Amino acid sequence: MTTYVILVAVLIGLSILLTFDTTWMSLLQGTRNELVFAERNKEYGAFDLRQSYTSRLGMAMVAAIAFFAVVVGTPYAISKLGDKAPAPDKVKIVEVNLDLFEEDQPEEPPPPPEVIPPPQPQIETVQFTAVEASDEPVEAPPPTQEDLKETTASTTTQEGEKIDAPPPPPPVEEVTYDLAAVQEQPEFSGGMAQMYSYLKKNIKYPDMEFDAGIQGKVYVEFVVEKDGSVEDVSIRRGVSPGLDKEALRAVKSMPKWTPGKMNGKAVKVRFTIPVDFKLQ
């Protein structure tokens, strides 16, 4: 707002200077106007405009100042007369002696109750004594087979409950490896070419498929056991019942392979081969 006030003051000052210019060159100077219009029609508009210019300029300046004051001063006056923001409350600083306060210690939770395991039942056992050849009489003979059926053999004899012994653990199933997972792959005696030669010699083309002109490849899956025998023979992808059955028979009749190995030990390996039936 200060900038606008300064600007208006400068404009007013310049206007006043122009108004009070009394030099002969000023078009508003009264003596010059009288001489210029001495023998002319003073009713002409130019003479009247020059004579009344000063009054009209003053009125215009007053009007402009009033308008500026209204436009600029009204918002300022409203802001001053409006609701004032409440003054912030004074904050009173109080010194506090922290030594007078004791830090609250959290209460420790009570310890969990002690879990007492239930008493284990005392198992009835009978002392097993090794039998040694001796001429001296035996004070405590070893238990008989009938005694061991009803109780448990141990290093001492004690009374207690008769509890059946737990069953033996189930046998661990041997892993059957895929062909790509073994370090040494199983091998037919003489190689794969010899295996296909063996199948070609031992396969008999079924009459029904031969008469119907059915041919194709039967994919047979089997497992080479650790001893090299061929087991778990099945059809992976067949062609017809007759060709599938003949392919199974021929693969089952193969002699033992050299088994696959992992870390130098023989393992079971799953193998898949195509058995080709082709009419000539």
Image (cartoon, rainbow, N blue to C red):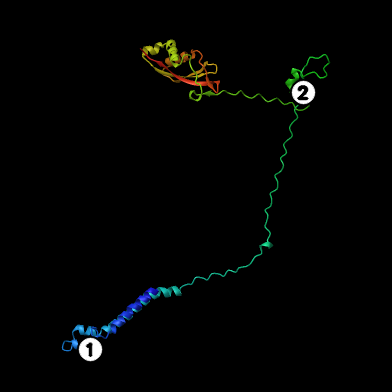
Residue 3 percent across, percent down from the top left: 38, 73
Quadrant location of residue 21? bottom left
Instruction: Please determine whether, in this image, residue 243 is positioned above or below residue 28.
Output: above
User: Viewed as shown, does residue 229 lie left or right of 141?
Assistant: left
In the rendered structure, which amino acid carries the disc numbered 2?
A: Val
- Closer-to-camera residue (239/36): 36
Residue 242 percent across, percent down from the top left: 43, 14
In the rendered structure, which amino acid carries the disc numbered 1?
A: Thr
Q: Residue at the left extreme? A: 39
Q: Quick check: marks 2 and 1 in contact, CB under 8 Å?
A: no
Residue 175 percent across, percent down from the top left: 55, 24
Residue 20 percent across, percent down from the top left: 29, 85
Q: Secondary structure at mark 2?
A: strand
Label 2: how many Cα within 10 Å (few below 14, some 14–19, many 20+): some
Query: Which mark is drawn over residue 252?
Result: none
Q: Secondary structure at mark 1?
A: helix
Q: Earlier in the sequence, mark 2 or mark 1?
A: 1
The residue at the point 35 percent across, 75 percent down is 7
Instruction: Please determine whether, in this image, residue 67 is positioned above or below residue 272.
Output: below
Label 1: how many Cα within 10 Å (few below 14, some 14–19, many 20+): few
Q: In front: mark 2 or mark 1?
A: 1
Q: Which residue is mark 1?
A: 31
Quadrant location of residue 77? bottom left
Quadrant of the rendering where the C terminus is positioned:
top left
How many discs appear? 2
Quadrant of the rendering where the N terminus is positioned:
bottom left
Q: Which residue is mark 2?
A: 126
C-alpha separation, residue under disc 2 versus residue under disc 1: 156 Å
